[in-house]
Image (cartoon, rainbow, N blue to C red):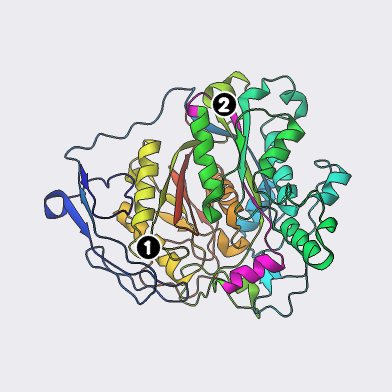
Amino acid sequence: MASIAGTCPLGALLRNISENNGKISVVHYEGLRLQQRLQMHSPSHYISASSSAPRCRTIKVMASPTVAAPKREKDPKKRVVITGMGLVSVFGSDIDGFYNKLLEGESGISLIDRFDASNFPVRFGGQIRDFSSEGYIDGKNDRRLDDCWRYCIVAGKRALDDANLGQQVLDTMDKTRIGVLVGSGMGGITAFSTGVEALVQKGYKKITPFFIPYSITNMGSALLAIDTGLMGPNYSISTACATANYCFCSAANHIRKGEADIMVVGGTEAAIMPSGLGGFIACRALSHRNEGPKKASRPWDKDRDGFVMGEGSGVLVMESLESATKRGARIIAEYLGGAITCDAHHMTDPRADGLGVSSCISKSLEDAGVSPEEVNYVNAHATSTLAGDLAEVNAIKKVFKDTSELKMNATKSMIGHGLGAAGGLEAIATIKAITTGWLHPTINQDNLEASVTIDTVPNVKKKHEVNVGISNSFGFGGHNSVVVFAPFRP
């Protein structure tokens, strides 16, 4: 049972609560701006800092007297496996090449040269160079498309190819049973900006008819389906930087409910352009290390000063075990479950107590049929912001009481923050950790925060057999998402 004062959502009840005869009172606190340093405390103390963010209300939780042992899904129609992966990244579009760069600890961050950024206070990011869509998009459409959709189509088709679902194979299948769900946090922002510029400078008659279609966030899923003929569930989700994980959760539910056999799922983003960069500068969210861009993204390091913009697309082919078995597909890993929650706190600041995140992790493990003790790897959201990094660690510690065997790393330390694509790229990194037995490092770990006592795989890769791994993604608006992957075991 739960008694809730106020309107902050709890998600699932936290397991094994023993304090105060089964009751916990989470006291009031105030949120933190990104530019303020969060001071960590024991969960038994309240956390406060000066901020104009609204206060969270008092929440009381009563523990369930008994907790059943977790049970994983056994029905092959409802078990969801990964049979293909595709990406577009600052390290190219080859999966192994991408992960090898991560294992080497190479930074993909550089000065921006796509446009003149010399007058911007931030002049660097994870800009993709030498991208080619040859063989995936015809020349006429390629010239018209926003990069956001170009990345999506290439990553999506590469994922299908990786799953042995090329066009010839697809044409023999029931395409109404195959869906597409690729989200974006910002959509075709270059197409939108170009349209507005045409309106202001030349009048409405000079606006291209592609202005609206190539701006709206659902167009990635639509264009990929149009190109491949996939007629199953098709839409997009836009929850800022949590977008891709939200898509994974929703796609898995379509499969579990029997509405689709296969879903092509992920996130895409291409926001490294003037208004995108300028907007995040205005939010005071970005690092200003113009003299050392490769050192700028430094999650959990005491000298971090904000995140670094990235871009790209990460797409998975999620499939019912029954479907994969019938067609003899190579099974890469298994998606065990996921969850979504909301902080209900502030547009950009995280909850300092981490309650929205910790409840999301707990709910994801419940959905996956996994106990906290089974998890030994976290691909963290870890954007390199002052408040966000420590709030996430605080939440992780609440769920995982013993972190001695837990490894936690930050993909963003090398590729920057891919925004709506981040969860897709990081899901691929998580799955590669599972399949290779190697964890990529978190680079720029020179002066670790004292409160970060979990192994962050600092600066050098580590051999580690992943039993169960989770990947966290959180977005502006307080959107939290966690997905759970594991090695496939029949």
> Can the viewer see residue 230 in this picture?
yes
335, 114: nearer the viewer:
114
Residue depicted at 62% across the width and 22% down the height: 328
| Relative to 374, residue 6 above or below | below
Residue depicted at 67% across the width and 27% down the height: 231
The spot of residue 376 in percent (x, y) is 40, 49
Q: Which image quadrant for residue 5?
A: bottom left
Mark on residue 260? 2
Q: In the figure, is residue 282 to the left or right of 165? A: left
Tell me, yes or no, whether the highlighted magenta stretch contains residue 257: yes
Q: In the figure, is residue 481 to the left or right of 353? A: right
Mark on residue 455? none
Residue assigned mark 1: 351
Q: Which residues are magenta?
A: 256-282
Q: Amino acid at mark 1?
A: Arg
Query: Quick one: SS at disc 1?
Result: loop
Query: Quick one: SS at disc 2?
Result: loop
| Relative to 100, residue 293 above or below | below
* Crowding near the residue tagged with mark 1, few <14, some 14–19, many ≥20 C-alpha atoms within 10 Å: many
Q: Amino acid at mark 2?
A: Ala
